[in-house]
């Protein structure tokens, strides 16, 4: 009744059609670099070794209901930190964000610092960003600085003399 062929006919793949006629838009067939692991190494050296940065590191969150205080308190993180609660002490990290409900009374040292809430103390970072809702009372030592319209800042600003001034102690 039915006669089935044991081996299927081989299919020939057709070349992909491009939408634009420009040769520069055709992707290169060079091997891709492997994707980093899900939580990856928290620090990756760049090609020029002038700085390091977090890659796919998880963000730690200190919620609105958390208050941390103590004498000579230092919080350290090798990844990103979002502060929505209140900290009385120093903070060191790769990337530190003080959320709109967050406050820090102490020095923040990080490669990237973003302030949306309140900081009473020094900010030391390669990149410092004060958002419109931020209130900062303290000095800033930075390599780059951006201040949004509406941000409140009382203190002085100076460029870091060298990278060690704005490098967090993550040990």
Image: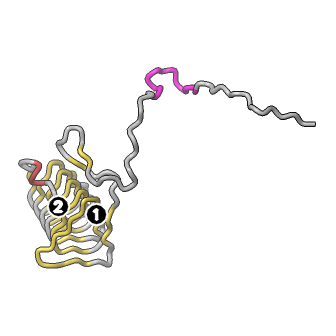
Q: Say what secondary structure mark 1 lies in.
A: strand
Residue at point 43%, 23% (across, down): 24
Q: In the rendered image, which quarter is residue 153 located in?
A: bottom left
Give yes or no for residue 35 being in the magenta stretch: no
**Does the rendering let one see residue 150?**
no
Tag 1–tag 2 contact (CB < 8 Å): no
Is 81 situated left or right of 35 in this image?
left
Question: What scheme was used to colour the molecule?
Answer: secondary structure
Q: What residue is disc 1 on?
A: 81
- Numbered tag placed on residue 171 in the rendering: 2
**Gap between marks 1 and 2, in whole Å?**
16 Å
Residue 142 coordinates in the image, percent (x, y): 14, 52
Question: Does 164 appear above or below 58?
Answer: above
Q: Mark 1 or mark 2, which is nearer to you?
A: 2
The residue lying toward the viewer, choosing from 125 and 144, is 125
* Highlighted magenta segment, given as a residue range: 16-27
Magenta includes 25?
A: yes
| Mark 1 Cα shell of 10 Å, populated few (<14), some (14-19), many (≥20) | many
The earlier-in-sequence mark between 1 and 2 is 1
Q: Position of residue 156 (x, y in %)?
A: 8, 58
């Amino acid at each position: 009744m039915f006669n089935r062929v044991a081996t299927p006919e081989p299919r020939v793949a057709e070349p992909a059609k491009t939408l634009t006629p420009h040769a520069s838009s055709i992707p290169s067939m060079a091997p891709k670099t492997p994707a980093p692991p899900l939580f990856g190494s928290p620090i990756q050296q760049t090609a020029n070794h002038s700085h390091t940065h977090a890659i796919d590191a998880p963000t730690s969150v200190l919620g609105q209901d958390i208050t941390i205080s103590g004498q000579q308190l230092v919080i350290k993180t090798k990844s990103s930190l979002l502060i929505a609660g209140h900290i009385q002490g120093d903070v060191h990290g790769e990337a530190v964000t003080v959320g709109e409900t967050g406050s820090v009374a102490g020095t923040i040292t990080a490669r990237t610092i973003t302030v949306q809430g309140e900081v009473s103390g020094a900010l030391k970072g390669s990149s410092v960003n004060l958002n419109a809702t931020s209130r900062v009372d303290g000095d800033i030592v930075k390599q780059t600085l951006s201040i949004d319209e509406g941000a409140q800042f009382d203190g002085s600003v100076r460029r870091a003399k060298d990278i060690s001034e704005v490098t967090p102690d993550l040990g």
